[in-house]
Amino acid sequence: MTFIKEPQKIESKSMDIIAPYLAAYPWSVDEKKVASRMIHASGDVEYAPHIRFASGAVSKMQLALKAGCSVYTDVEMVRTGINKRRLKKLGGEVFCHIAEPLIFQRAKAHGTTRSMEAMYSFGKSLNGSIIAIGNAPTALFAVMEMCKEQKITPAGIIGTPVGFVGAAEAKQELFETDLPYVTVLGTKGGSSIAAAAVNAILYSIAELKVE
């Protein structure tokens, strides 16, 4: 059996296969790069009709990353999937608090989820950051609450929580805000999708070559 072995050739071939499915969408070149990697991570071209970008959100996140912003995630799976070496070159880090004992204690005491308490714990550190939520709808609800009530102003929110309870509702609410976002409407999503979107924006920054 003959098959492609080189990682870069595999990726390039994948992007060539995905490209026709995005041709009709009125997205910028960099937005299509983000959508392509989200589809690549899912293995599902049916993602395309569900992807949404707030106007200028990808550009705003590019600028924030160039300036050395950090990324804050809801779960370890998102944190693990982000290219931390590439991010570090720009001066940023990835943070996730969900596994910390204090977060567990707060969640138990407040009757909330650990992902909510983890996002609350970041506080004003979220200003100017990129927030990547791939698993927990409650984390996305918490972030939107902080933006509204505490006037938190992230550079961008990648909100792709997955599932059947609260995920579609949280992403619909994000879609209806004026926040800079990338999202996938409906029940689709996941940690790999959120990480892929972050990486796509990292890779789209012209000063660095894709590794």
Image (cartoon, grey):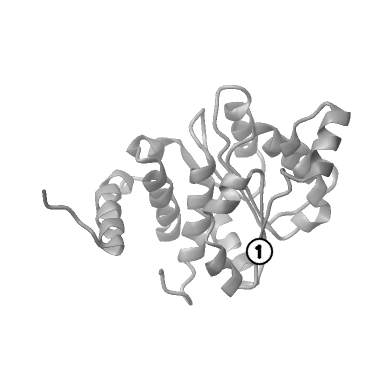
Residue 86 is left or right of residue 22, and the answer is right
Residue 146 is left or right of residue 185, and the answer is right
Query: Residue visible at 60% across and 70% down?
Result: 88
Image spot of residue 11 (x, y percent): 31, 57
Image spot of residue 107 (x, y percent): 81, 33
Query: Residue visible at 57% across and 48% down?
Result: 78
- Residue 37 or 81: which is nearer the viewer? 81
Location of mark 1 (residue): 93
Q: Is 162 above or below relative to 67?
A: above
- Residue 91 or 36: which is nearer the viewer? 91
Name the image quarter holding residue 68.
bottom right
Name the image quarter holding residue 85.
bottom right
Regarding residue 148, the answer to whether it shows in the image is no
Secondary structure of the residue carrying tag 1 is loop
- Which residue ends up furthest to the right in the rendered image? 109
- Which residue ends up furthest to the bottom in the rendered image? 207
Name the image quarter holding residue 29.
bottom left
